[in-house]
């Protein structure tokens, strides 16, 4: 196995050869068409993750297929089931977050499989998860701001829509982990989007006050990092949002 790294491989490496493969998940079949990205993660263990564009074999519906695989057998007993456990947590997050809000992909199907001799670790764990494909283009918010693709006059609208999204998640008992920079958005609508709901944690369902909606610090930090303090104050020091600087920061 190559040196372990957290770096992504946008065009795929080890799992790219599975383009065109049909995966059977329950009573449905899905064919991977082209790889989007591949990554060898380090979380105390190594786990190979890949995301494919795919299609429902019967209907032709475009979907997203995620594969999670053990790249080798761990010599540490407690790590041998880590990929399986983290995969199950990921599936749970997508199932929990899929409520037709448009803020996350919808859960479609999943299966816990075993690798055959075409994979790195025959008989090792292989998780397959199928999600809906967003018909609209999404971009990373932080990257788009750095590239000047989000205008200053759009910041207030983007912040308000992020608040709406976070409140929708809170109603479902989900909170995004603090200081995640993986938030996405739809450039045409300025609607935020989260493609990786496994980054959420469980909380008591309900609606906190704005001062308790800590997730808003994600977007505040991104705006501050790109535009500076004056613009951050302009966006966030309006009406009830004054807590961010005076109390909540």
Image (spheres, grey):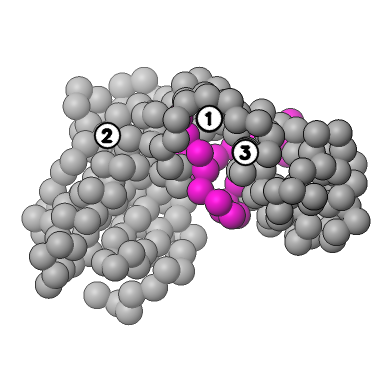
Counting from the top left corner in percent of width and height, residue 181 is at: 60, 54
Q: Which numbered mark, 1 or 2, is in the foreground of this view? A: 1
Q: Which mark is residue 170?
A: 1
Counting from the top left corner in percent of width and height, residue 177 is at: 51, 48
Question: Would you say residue 90 sits in the magenta stretch?
Answer: no
Q: Is residue 20 left or right of residue 202?
A: left
Query: Between marks 1 and 2, how big is the CA–CA gap?
Result: 25 Å
Residue at (47, 26) in percent of width and height: 205
Circles 3, 1 touching at the beta carbon (< 8 Å):
no
Upstream in the sequence, badge 3 or badge 1? Answer: 1
Upstream in the sequence, badge 2 or badge 3? Answer: 2
- At label 1, counting other C-alpha atoms closer than 10 Å, the crowd grade (few under 14, some 14-19, many 20 or more) is many
- Rendered-image quadrant of the N terminus: bottom left
What element does badge 3 sit on? helix
Q: Which mark is residue 110?
A: 2
The residue pinned by badge 3 equals 212
Range of residues picked out in magenta = 173-197
């Amino acid at each position: 196995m190559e040196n372990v790294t957290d770096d992504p491989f946008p065009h795929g490496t080890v799992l790219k050869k599975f383009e065109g493969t049909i995966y059977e998940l329950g009573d449905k079949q899905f064919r991977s068409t082209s790889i989007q990205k591949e990554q060898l993660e380090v979380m105390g263990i190594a786990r190979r993750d890949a995301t494919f564009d795919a299609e429902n074999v019967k209907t032709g519906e475009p979907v997203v297929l995620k594969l999670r695989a053990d790249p080798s057998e761990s010599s540490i007993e407690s790590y041998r089931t880590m990929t399986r456990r983290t995969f199950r947590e990921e599936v749970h997050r997508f199932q929990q977050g899929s409520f037709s809000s448009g803020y996350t992909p919808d859960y479609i199907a999943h299966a816990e499989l075993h690798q055959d001799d075409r994979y790195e670790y025959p008989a090792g764990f292989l998780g397959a998860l199928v999600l809906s494909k967003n018909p609209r283009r999404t971009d990373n918010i932080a990257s788009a701001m750095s590239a000047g693709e989000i205008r200053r006059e759009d910041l207030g609208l983007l912040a308000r829509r992020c608040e709406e999204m976070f409140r929708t998640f809170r109603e479902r008992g989900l909170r995004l982990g603090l200081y995640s920079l993986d938030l996405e958005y739809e450039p045409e609508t300025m609607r935020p989007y989260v493609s990786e709901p496994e980054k959420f944690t469980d909380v008591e369902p309900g609606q906190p006050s704005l001062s308790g909606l800590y997730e808003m610090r994600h977007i505040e930090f991104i705006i501050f990092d790109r535009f500076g303090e004056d613009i951050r104050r302009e966006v966030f020091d309006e009406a009830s949002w004054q807590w961010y600087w005076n109390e909540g920061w």
